[in-house]
Image (cartoon, helix red, strand yellow):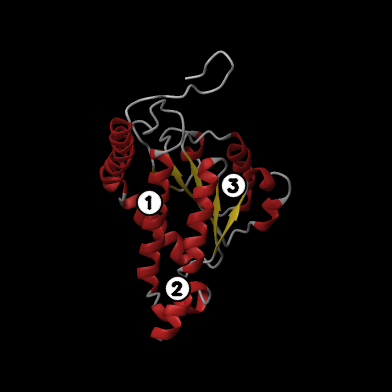
């Protein structure tokens, strides 16, 4: 809580009690988010399978697009795609509206992340994307949203609430979106027959690259 000067009050308590209190808080977050992931296994359904089929059949790239906290998740998903055999790049919605939509072609597929499905910058992109004619896959928490209605495939990332006690900070929703992205990437990897040799080709640097080179 803030005091009258606008600073957070120092919370004083017995050190042993405080330690266990902090451990419990941290564990509760992991438990809540794990439950969200487990309950979302039913979200891997026919829509998910259709998304995989679309991505396998395109000749272009997967363009991951989101803004705010989901934007960081979209970047990670795109990076995972690229390193596991599915060519991808991240497109910032605001930059897209100022000329970067020129990077998009009908041979690509859009993968759009939005918890509400009503993100203004994304909604403003939709008419142009429809005009270009590429498929749109969304990982979206708003089943009746504008984004969902304009998507060819919708993978639900809807959560009952965020694990943030204020139910405000994107936490459970972004974790679920990330895991759904991993599910897409790993399924695509398996369907493509992507090998350790392929991974080594795309990932020559770092300790992982060194380990892969030694094993090949």
Identify the residue at image location x=56%, y=13%: 4
Identify the residue at image location x=39%, y=68%: 189
Q: Nearer the viewer, residue 75 or 194?
A: 75
SS state under label 1: helix
Identify the residue at image location x=50%, y=55%: 76
Name the residue that disc number 1 marks: 179
Identify the residue at image location x=41%, y=27%: 167
x, y percentage for residue 77?
48, 56
Name the residue that disc number 2 marks: 208
Name the residue that disc number 3 marks: 130
x, y percentage for residue 187?
36, 63
Res 93 seen here: yes
Q: Cα distance, mark 2 to mark 1? A: 22 Å
Q: Quadrant of residue 104?
A: bottom right
Q: With respect to residue 58, does 207 lie above or below?
A: below
x, y percentage for residue 51?
41, 55
Q: Quadrant of residue 194?
A: bottom left
Q: Nearer the viewer, residue 197 or 134?
A: 197
Q: Earlier in the sequence, mark 3 or mark 2?
A: 3
Q: Cα distance, mark 1 to mark 3? A: 27 Å
Q: Quadrant of the C terminus?
A: bottom left
């Amino acid at each position: 809580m803030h005091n009258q000067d606008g600073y957070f009050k120092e919370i004083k308590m017995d050190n042993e009690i405080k330690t266990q209190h902090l451990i419990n808080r941290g564990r509760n977050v992991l438990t809540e988010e794990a439950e969200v992931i487990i309950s979302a296994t039913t979200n891997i359904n026919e829509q998910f399978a259709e998304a995989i089929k679309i991505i396998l059949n395109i000749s272009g790239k997967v363009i991951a697009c989101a803004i705010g906290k989901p934007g960081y998740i979209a970047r990670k998903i795109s990076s995972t795609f690229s390193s596991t055999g599915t060519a991808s790049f991240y497109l910032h919605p605001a930059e897209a509206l100022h000329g970067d939509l020129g990077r998009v072609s009908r041979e690509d597929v859009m993968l759009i992340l939005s918890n509400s499905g009503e993100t203004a910058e994304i909604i403003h992109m939709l008419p142009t994307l429809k005009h270009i004619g590429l498929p749109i896959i969304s990982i979206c928490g708003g089943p009746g949203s504008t984004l969902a209605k304009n998507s060819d495939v919708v993978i639900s990332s809807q959560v009952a609430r965020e694990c943030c006690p204020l139910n405000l900070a994107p936490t459970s929703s972004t974790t679920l979106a990330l895991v759904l992205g991993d599910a897409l990437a790993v399924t695509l990897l398996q369907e493509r027959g992507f090998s350790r040799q392929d991974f080594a080709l795309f990932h020559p640097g770092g300790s992982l690259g060194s380990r892969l080179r030694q094993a090949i």
